[in-house]
Image (spheres, helix red, strand yellow):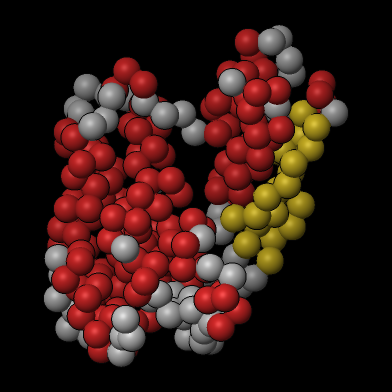
Amino acid sequence: MTRTDDTRAQELGERIGYAFQSGALALEALTHRSRAVRNNERLEFLGDSVLNLVVAQILFDRHPQLPEGELSRIRAGLVNREALLQIAQKLRLGELLRLGEGELKSGGGGRPSILADAVEAVLGAVFRDGGFAAAEAVIRNLLAPMMDDIDLTTAPKDAKTSLQEWLQARHRALPRYQLLETRGEAHDQTFRVQCIMDDLSLTTEAEGKSRRMAEQLAAQRALERLPEGGA
């Protein structure tokens, strides 16, 4: 099926249950950097923040008995790449994306990272187009099944916590996180960090838009290199 840009914007609105006032914003959310200089990366940054805030608010209201640490763990499980990928697949978002020729040929429309990032970009576009209330309504609708299925007894742990617990259980020294580099302007920085485990002679690196994000990604890479994936 051949889609025009107007059709893509309209279909996106129908699938997420939101009528865009600006079709250009919807298209920007669907445009990968391989396609155009004006792409969805900035909207992805915005959508990530809105998503985290809305999910935090929902969890805060739904579970007044839970401490901050547990709320953070549950939120991490609801906004991670796997969860976003599930949403993208449910929306069949891949078929709406505007990709460059190289990405199209290599199957970029089905790549988990591209799909997950596009979901955040779409949420950012809704926020810019209709404000916080509109974004909140869309997020609540998209996450409703996951919210209802939360098992509080098995709340997911973030990567740094999981890595620390794995090492403590084996009486190993805790990891060290070292900032290697900070790039970019103050409003758009990228942080590169190392996760260093001296006992295991293991070091991993990762980059993120915040130091905390970079540390989490480095810890996740460390977990993946531990015996049985850190299990």
Residue 214 in percent (x, y) is at 61, 49
Please say if 128 is above or below 117. Answer: below
Residue 198 in view in this figure: yes
Q: Quadrant of residue 12?
A: bottom left
Q: Nearer the viewer, residue 209 or 156?
A: 156
Look at 26% across and 40% down and name the residue there.
146
* Drawn side of residue 196 relative to residue 53, left or right: right
Residue 71 in percent (x, y) is at 33, 32
Q: Nearer the viewer, residue 136 or 113?
A: 113
Q: Quadrant of the C terminus?
A: top right
Look at 59% across and 55% down and name the residue there.
208
- Residue furthest out toward the front: 1
Residue 152 in percent (x, y) is at 29, 22
Look at 28% across and 46% down and name the residue there.
55
Residue 130 in view in this figure: no
Q: Quadrant of residue 139?
A: bottom left
Look at 22% across and 76% down and name the residue there.
11
* Drawn side of residue 184 relative to residue 89, left or right: right
* Drawn side of residue 42 relative to residue 61, left or right: right
Q: Nearer the viewer, residue 212 or 101?
A: 101
Residue 122 in percent (x, y) is at 32, 68
